[in-house]
Amino acid sequence: DTEQKKQLNFTSLVSTTHEIPKYKCVSAKNAPYVKWGEDNNFPDYLFELFKNSSQMAAIILQMKNYVLGSGITSNFHLKIVNRKLETFENFIDKLVFDYLLYGGFAFQIIKNKLGQIAELNHLDFKYIRVDEDETKVFFSKDWSKGRRTPLVYDRWDVNSNSSNSVFYYKGQLTRECYPMPFYISCLTSLEISTQIGDFHLNNLLNGFSPSCIINFNNGSNISEDVQDEIEDAVKEKFCGTENASKILLSFNDDMTHKTTFERLADDGMIDKYNNLQQTTEKDIFRAFRMNKLLLGDGSDNTGFNKQAYLESFALYNKSVIEPIQREIEGVLDISLGKGSVKFNKFELDWGADEDENTSKLIE
């Protein structure tokens, strides 16, 4: 048996599964708040996707630019909204970003003795939780295993007399207590998009190992310690992009015990990943209802086309951007006062060749 084990010294490959966090609201035992996701980390997962998916980051940030337009018009009485010297425009910028990433936003409203708004503080939405009645808002920068006692605020409403409350908005896509991001249907594709990049990077850095086998004949007589040393030496000398085209030298006692080198047949994995990348990319842009052209990414055959961009933007602006602008404007009218925010239309300066038709398409 021992001799057979030496001869069958293969590495076991175990198939693993990866479960994507699900959107759900879960009542927490012995806690006054509702968990956002099974492990109370769903918004953190969305933020990690944003950081690791170049497609998602590009789309979210471009949407933010479109929603903010060419600036805002406001009659809100505060130009500097808090002690951090944050401007009202910066404050709105953060709310729009949270809305696009998480589906909602939250901010603290502090009033003076006269009942007037004296300070506004944006609250990073991934740190927010609420109770089942949605009357209390909890804030903590670390929800893992309850390491921190969260701050507790009254939720702002139209009849609120509290001098320190939090306005909590969860969007219009859910009846649960937490918002649902509008791109939720493509979470799997977003996850795949981050893994494809890792695959190509690892394939590049470890290009030697998947393409060939080095057989050390009569190697069953080599002790495990020596086998480990040989494995480390091979990795150090020949794996990775920096070691491309190096010569492999084999020192043998005779032809009978020579080292053999076998190249594995190409399994087409890279082509499979490239095809998968194209499929997931389509799914992502479909979920965000965006055309690649709106990111400045033209057709592979024709490149960037100004007229096509204008037509795509006109449709996207009417069907996606303007509804978001109206929704946020209406919500802030209620909490901060009528006319507190009005998003100006997004405009592009095309230079001297801009004509009347271009202006109409932008509008």
Image (tube, rainbow, N blue to C red):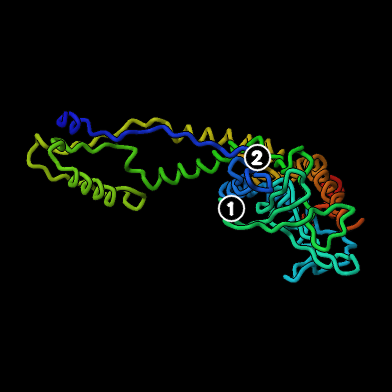
Local secondary structure at mark 1: helix
The crowd level at tag 2 (other Cα within 10 Å; few <14, some 14-19, many 20+) is: some
Question: In x, y percent, where is residue 68?
Answer: 78, 54
The crowd level at tag 1 (other Cα within 10 Å; few <14, some 14-19, many 20+) is: few
Measure the C-alpha gap from mark 1 to mark 2: 15 Å
Q: Which residue type carries mark 1? A: Gly
- Residue 332 in the figure: left or right of residue 66: right
Image-quadrant location for residue 112? bottom right
Question: Of the numbered discs in the image, which one, if any, rests on residue 122?
Answer: none
Local secondary structure at mark 2: strand
Q: Is residue 236 above or below residue 269?
A: below
- Residue 47 in the figure: left or right of residue 178: left
Q: Which residue is mark 1?
A: 146
For the N terminus, give its image quadrant. top left
- Residue 54 in the figure: left or right of residue 163: left
Image-quadrant location for residue 72? bottom right
Q: Is residue 359 above or below residue 257?
A: below
Q: Which residue is mark 2?
A: 26
Question: In x, y percent, where is residue 300?
Answer: 60, 40
Residue lying farthest to the front in this orientation: 30
Question: In x, y percent, where is residue 106?
Answer: 75, 54
Q: Looking at the image, can residue 3 be seen?
A: yes
Count of picture labels: 2
Question: In x, y percent, where is residue 285?
Answer: 66, 38
Residue lying farthest to the left in this orientation: 254
Instruction: Kindly identify the residue that appears in the image at 53 percent across and 43 percent down.
Output: 194
